[in-house]
Amino acid sequence: MGTVLVVGTTFGVVARQSGLQPVEIAGMSLLVFAGASQFAMVQLFSERVPTAIVIASVLFINLRHVLMAASLRAQLQRLPLAGRIVAGFVLTDESFAMATGYFRRGGRSLAYYFTFAISLYVLWNLATLAGIAIGSAIGDPRRLGVDFAITATFTGIVVLAIRRRSEAVIAVVAALVSGGLALAGASTLAVITAGALAPVIAVVTRR
Amino acid sequence: MIWLAIAGSAIATFLVRSTPFVVTIRGRLPPAASRYLEALPVAIIAALVGPAVVAPAGTLTHGAEPVAAALVVVTVVWRRSLLAGVLVGVIAVALLRTT
């Protein structure tokens, strides 16, 4: 829960510093509600990447949720359709991890999942608003290095997510390929090309 | 255009999260596809780092960003803290740019 507040506030600050309007930033947290994707959107907006590529990048980042939802569906099957739709909207890495642990320990209460997941949604949006206020109060972002916060956040997210050597290799390859493409002038397609190609390493290597 | 991207991203994210709860999908995903999907987020986020480190604002870096990114990696590996990593990275880049 604490992490959500810190990351949500950071998101509000860097999004505001990148020049997005407060209502756009608040709208992203209300409608998209996906941490890494929202940071990615801020960066892609600042690079003036076409809308279709922004959406495709977000889709790729969040495709993993198909696997998470599929693994939770047995427990949520008894809900009415509207309940399942809400369950999907508030599904995040954090609520998935919490729910998986809870159901494995023999928990049955779906209220537990909804309380946790919806709390995260509320906190994420409150933290975003706090970040917008802070970001508006800070002066020139480049002078203070605040523009680098988004890159530092991505770097940290990747480091924390790496559990196997193959994932470290994938991350380094993806960063080098996209950096190389950007230097070569293909900055529009750099991220999505490198990001979609590097995971092939996971398919062709054995763990 | 920003709102179009926000709406499109919201719909894409929602569909990805809700479809398995609403539609019955038969059979299992091939293991190769699962491995690809599991590796995808790390790859995309790492791919966002590459250009921001070697070519921030579209021009070749003067060295501040790669050094700061390396310090972020060391800090996060050491402290396992995202916040510590971000603070070190921001302070490092601010100091390095002035030198």
Image (cartoon, coloured by chain):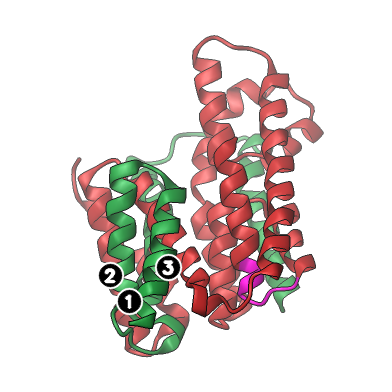
Chain colours: A red, B green
| Horizontal arrangement in the rendering, residue B76 relative to residue A65 (left or right) | left
What secondary structure is found at the residue carrying circle 2? helix
Q: Which of marks 2 and 3 is nearer the N terminus?
A: 3
CB within 8 Å, label 1 to label 3: no
- Dot label at residue B64: 1
- In-front residue for pair A51/A161: A161
- In-front residue for pair A83/B92: B92
State the residue at coordinates (75%, 24%). Answer: A79
Q: What residue type is labelled 1?
A: Ala
Q: Position of residue A20 (x, y in %)?
A: 69, 74
Locate the C terminus of chain A and report the quarter of the image it occupies. top left
| Horizontal arrangement in the rendering, residue A112 relative to residue A172 (left or right) | right
What secondary structure is found at the residue carrying circle 3? helix
CB within 8 Å, label 1 to label 2: yes
| Horizontal arrangement in the rendering, residue B91 relative to residue A84 (left or right) | left
Q: What residue did someone put label 3 on?
A: B48
- Dot label at residue B67: 2
